[in-house]
Image (spheres, rainbow, N blue to C red):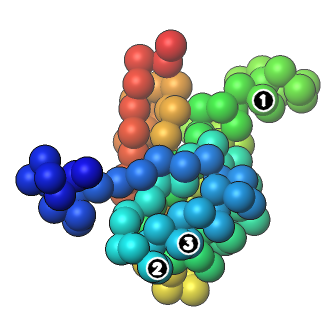
């Protein structure tokens, strides 16, 4: 379909949920069809590693949603940038990928403010927080 529209395969990026099934689908799309995939709804290092082991192109780690969960479910209601659980999570994922030379791009997403965005990772996706 994309070829008929004159769009090169290299420009296609399929967004999938980073469940086991989504990761398996991404693996097939990437390895057998050369279609780039972005795995989203990622909240843990273990999900990130599973994505990297499947050689997916890109993952979105939801920094803001991890932060939100901690605010609701712990006694801490505010965090400094470096202590923000979401920032710590995406930093841990990024460092792990660097250490083990994974090609998968780590992109922090769902940041709640620009300070967190600027301080935590090379790739990011920002919103107005809504």
27 over 44 or under it: above or below: below
Residue 89 appears anywhere in the view = no
Which label belongs to residue 31?
A: 2
> In what element is the residue under mark 2?
helix
Give the residue at x 66% y 32%. Answer: 65
In whole angstroms, how far apart are the C-alphas of marks 2 and 3?
6 Å
Mark toward the viewer: 3 or 1 = 3
Q: Residue at x 89, y 28 (%)?
A: 74
Could you say which disc has been placed on residue 103 in the image?
none
Q: Give the percent coordinates (x, y) of residue 109.
A: 49, 40
Closer to the camera, 124 or 103? 103
Residue 4 location, x and y as percent? Answer: 14, 53
Residue 75 is drawn in which quadrant? top right
* Residue 60 horizontal/vertical position (percent): 52, 49
Where disc 3 sits, the SS reads helix
If you read the primary sequence from the N terminus, does the residue marked by circle 3 or circle 1 appear first?
3
Query: Residue at label 1?
Result: 69
- Residue at the disc numbered 3: 27
- Per the model, the C-alpha gap separating discs 2 and 1 is 34 Å
Q: Residue at x 39, y 45 (%)?
A: 124
**Looking at the image, do the residues carrying marks 2 and 3 touch, with CB atoms under 8 Å apart?**
yes
């Amino acid at each position: 379909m994309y070829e008929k529209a004159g769009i090169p395969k290299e420009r296609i990026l399929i967004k999938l949920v980073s469940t086991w099934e989504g990761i398996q689908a991404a693996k097939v799309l990437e390895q057998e069809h050369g279609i780039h995939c972005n795995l989203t709804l990622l909240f843990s290092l273990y999900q990130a590693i599973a994505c990297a082991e499947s050689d997916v192109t890109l993952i979105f780690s939801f920094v803001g949603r991890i932060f939100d969960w901690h605010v609701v479910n712990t006694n801490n209601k505010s965090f400094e940038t470096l202590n923000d659980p979401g920032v710590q999570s995406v930093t841990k994922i990024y460092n792990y990928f660097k250490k083990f030379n994974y090609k998968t791009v780590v992109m922090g997403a769902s940041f709640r403010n620009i300070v967190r965005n600027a301080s935590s990772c090379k790739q990011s996706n920002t919103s107005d927080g809504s």
